Amino acid sequence: MTNRVLVIGALIAGLGVAVGAFGAHGLRPILTDKMMAVFETGVRYHLVHALAMLIAGLSAHCFGHRIFVKAGWSFCLGILIFSGSLYTLALSGVRTLGMLTPLGGLAFLIGWGFLAWGYWKLPFTRNT
């Protein structure tokens, strides 16, 4: 499961770069400034949480705790819902999709909570 989190995290990060480039070069002439800002917010959260997904996967690999895998999948779900709803809103203009965005934000928060909990539970030793 750890490998899946890492592979999918890397693929989602690459996809974030591609989506960002598409927005910057293909959508800027088409979208209003407001909708471009919405799209760019989706890209920003997409890329940040793809990196968080990789951190969670590496943590699961290094420390062997499943809580990190849960964090990774929460970040993945957040990207799909949060960024996906913003991309769709910017491209379609359908405002009701904005109601989904907070659910993606909640998935991000849950992921950060899992990550924090996992690190809190690690048996760190003090080097003096």
Image (cartoon, grey):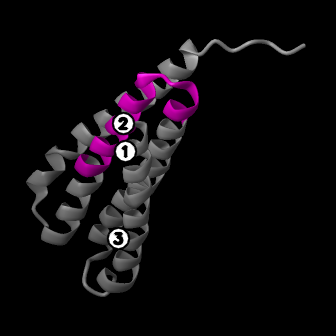
- Say if 65 sits above or below 87 in the image: above
Check disc 3 and report its element: helix, strand or loop: helix
Q: Which mark is residue 19?
A: 3
Q: Which residue is mark 2?
A: 1
Find residue 24 and report its horizontal and vertical position in percent.
40, 79
The type of residue carrying mark 3 is Val
Q: Is residue 107 above or below residue 127?
A: below
Q: Residues within 10 Å of mark 3 (few under 14, many from 20)?
A: many
Question: Would you say the residues marked 2 and 1 are in contact, meaning their CB atoms lie under 8 Å apart?
Answer: yes
Q: Where does the image place residue 48, in percent across and percent down from the top left?
A: 47, 51
**Amino acid type of the residue tagged 2 in the rendering:** Met
Marks 3/1: CA–CA distance: 22 Å
Name which of mark 2 and mark 3 comes first in the sequence: 2
Residue 61 x/y as whole percent = 52, 34
Residue at 50% from the left image edge and 21% from the top image edge = 118
40 shown above or below 115: below
Task: Read off the residue under disc 1.
Answer: 4
Mark 2 and mark 3 in contact? Answer it, CB < 8 Å.
Answer: no
Residue count near mark 2 (Cα–Cα under 10 Å), binned few <14, some 14–19, many ≥20: few
What's the amino acid at mark 1? Arg
Q: Which residues are magenta?
A: 59-81
Q: What kind of element bears circle 1?
A: helix
Residue drawn at x 45%, y 29% is: 68
Left or right of 78, for residue 94: left
Q: Nearer the viewer, mark 2 or mark 3?
A: 2
76 in magenta? yes
Taking the image as shown, residue 24 lies to the left or right of residue 82, namely: right
Give me the residue at 13% from left, 69% from top.
Answer: 92
